[in-house]
Image (cartoon, rainbow, N blue to C red):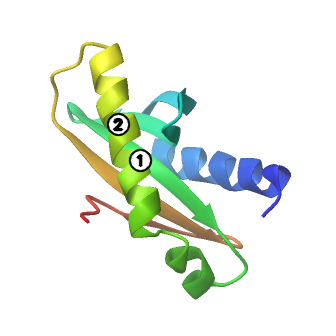
Amino acid sequence: MSRHKGDIAEKKACDYLKSQGFIIIEQNFYAKKLGEIDIICKKEKVYHFIEVKSADDYEIAINNVTPSKLSKLKRSVDYYLQKKSLDTDFCIDVIIVVKEKIELLENITF
């Protein structure tokens, strides 16, 4: 997927999260050598670290959420929490964007 399409999907994801009562803290946080966190937001004192996946088909998008990607994301989250000196409740979520449909998968485990 092109960077432009990814940016559009992230914008849709942020708009969706705001409509659901989330507060966007940061976007595209880059942790050196670890990876990027697409969206960092907060709701009811819980931080949500969100990976956004987009495709023309739901199955393709969800299959791009690999164990390797989630492992890198977890390490990036750990780095973020340490860098910001945060001791807080958090979860890792995925947002799937397929055309105009958005699905939030909360508290992904691996």
For the image, the number of numbered tags is 2
Give the amino acid type for the residue marked by disc 2 in the picture. Answer: Val
Q: How far apart are marks 2 and 1 (CA)?
A: 6 Å
The residue that appears at 45% across and 69% down in the rendered structure is 66
Q: What residue is pinned by disc 1?
A: 73
The answer to whether residue 109 of the structure is visible from this angle is yes
**What is the secondary structure assignment of the residue under circle 1?**
helix
Mark carried by residue 77: 2
The residue that appears at 78% across and 64% down in the rendered structure is 1
The residue that appears at 15% across and 22% down in the rendered structure is 87
The residue that appears at 33% across and 46% down in the rendered structure is 74
Report the front residue among 70 and 57: 70
Q: In this view, does 69 lie to the left or right of 6?
A: left
Circle 2 residues within 10 Å: few <14, some 14–19, many ≥20: many
- Residue 56: x and y in percent read 73, 80
Give the amino acid type for the residue marked by disc 1 in the picture. Answer: Leu
